[in-house]
Image (cartoon, rainbow, N blue to C red):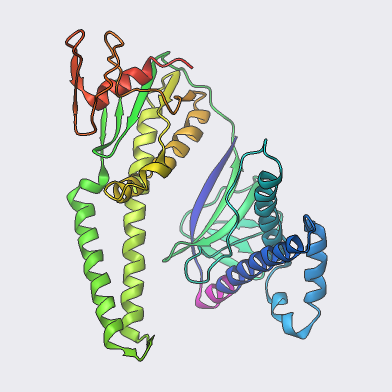
């Protein structure tokens, strides 16, 4: 199996400039490829091949206007073209072939909002003791040691708003796990992140004092920078000062801190569930898109990161050879009585305790749902 390894880079000032230039080139080539595909589509044609676009870029580099493309590795442009073509083709195939899964149309990458990242050729990636060789950047220090004398796949360099990272895929042997034969049902919620049928309840990290304190500080910083913008308004435009840049940098770092706390909590939760080594895990299928339309729930749903929870659980189950089952979207796990199977049609969202009028069974609403999921059969 291929396992990802992500390590922080410690570039010099000169190396960091080269990293930014490489990330900017990758973004520009990606956007240029999408624009070419759009133009081709408007003229009634279907799709420009990956090779044709690469040949066009090679000719562009010979022109003085695009000489700056030669300052970075040619593999960065090649991979950016491939990424854009793959994304566009998936959307195009979904539009033309009704039997295929529809995907969202790829968007142009923004210099301000998109994550800076680029590709490094896996053959040219070399590793020494806490050093990694990147194309046209040189030997860059790393915080941790990357595995040596192994084959690397899909190396990517990215920036998370504060630090640069290199991530690579490394082929590892999959260990054989002794599973217990148990089936676990997991009910995801807003009050608590996950309620498991074995009785474990994993809290909502967003309700802890630590996260609320950081969120409060974030709101204050956002109000502060808003006042700075109003103070420096000149007619219809805003003038950015050094103080505004400093505040915006602090806001970005605060957002990053919150995202890391939530991501870490998801990893800890999913790892703990999988390490119980059940043979089968059943999770509910949530209509997240519909839940996001509810103005009272949208923020809480977004912070819980249900899709990321399921994604992590999926690949960790594959590592342990655990069967992961998604219950049918219309399976009424919350409305069914676990004891007698009676369906309570008038159950409201405010009813936190499930009480069955037929057999008198009483339990926590979410725990009852997790038990029903554990006994689910497709």
Q: Position of residue 359 (x, y in %)?
A: 20, 7
Q: Position of residue 291 (x, y in %)?
A: 36, 43
Residue 17: say if magenta: yes
Q: Quadrant of residue 266?
A: top left
Which residue in the rendered view is the most extreme toward the front? 346
Whether residue 277 sits left or right of residue 298 in the image: it is right
Residue 33: say if magenta: no
Q: Is residue 311 visible?
A: yes
Whether residue 300 sits left or right of residue 285 in the image: it is left
Q: Position of residue 44 (x, y in %)?
A: 78, 59
Magenta range is 12-19
Seen at 36% across and 67% down, the residue is: 252
Closer-to-camera residue (287/272): 287
Q: Is residue 153 above or below residue 113?
A: above
Q: Quadrant of residue 242?
A: bottom left
Q: Is residue 121 visible?
A: no
Seen at 49% across and 17% down, the residue is: 378
């Amino acid at each position: 199996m291929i396992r990802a390894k992500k390590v922080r880079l410690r570039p010099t000032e000169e190396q960091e400039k080269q990293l930014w230039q490489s990330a900017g080139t990758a973004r520009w080539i990606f956007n240029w490829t999408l624009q070419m595909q759009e133009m081709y589509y408007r003229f009634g044609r279907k799709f420009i091949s990956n090779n044709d676009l690469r040949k066009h870029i090679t000719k562009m580099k010979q022109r003085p206007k695009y000489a700056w493309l030669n300052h970075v590795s040619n593999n960065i442009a090649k991979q950016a073209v491939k990424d854009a073509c793959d994304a566009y083709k998936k959307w195009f195939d979904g539009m033309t072939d009704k039997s295929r899964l529809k995907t969202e149309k790829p968007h142009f990458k923004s210099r301000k909002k998109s994550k800076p990242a680029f590709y490094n050729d896996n053959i040219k990636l070399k590793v020494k003791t806490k050093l990694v060789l990147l194309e046209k950047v040189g030997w860059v220090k790393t915080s941790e040691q990357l595995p040596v004398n192994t084959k690397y796949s899909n190396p990517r360099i990215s920036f998370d708003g504060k630090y640069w990272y290199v991530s690579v895929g490394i082929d590892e042997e999959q260990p054989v796990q002794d599973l217990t034969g148990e089936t676990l049902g997991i009910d995801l919620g807003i009050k608590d992140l996950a309620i498991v049928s074995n009785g474990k309840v994993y809290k909502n990290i967003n309700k802890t004092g630590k996260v609320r304190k950081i969120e409060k500080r974030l709101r204050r910083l956002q109000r502060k920078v808003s006042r700075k913008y109003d103070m420096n308004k000149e007619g219809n435009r805003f003038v950015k000062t050094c103080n505004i840049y400093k505040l915006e940098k602090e806001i970005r770092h605060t957002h990053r801190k919150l995202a890391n706390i939530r991501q870490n909590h998801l990893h800890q939760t999913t790892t703990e569930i999988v390490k119980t080594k059940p043979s089968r895990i059943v999770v509910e299928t949530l209509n997240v898109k519909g839940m996001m339309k509810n103005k009272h729930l949208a923020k809480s749903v977004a912070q819980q990161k249900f899709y990321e929870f399921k994604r992590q659980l999926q690949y960790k189950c594959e590592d342990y050879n655990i069967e992961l089952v998604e219950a049918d979207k219309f399976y009424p796990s919350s409305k069914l009585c676990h004891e007698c199977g009676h369906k309570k049609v008038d159950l409201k969202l405010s009813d936190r305790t499930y009480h069955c009028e037929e057999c008198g069974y009483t339990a926590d609403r979410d725990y009852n749902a997790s038990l029903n999921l554990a006994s689910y059969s497709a």
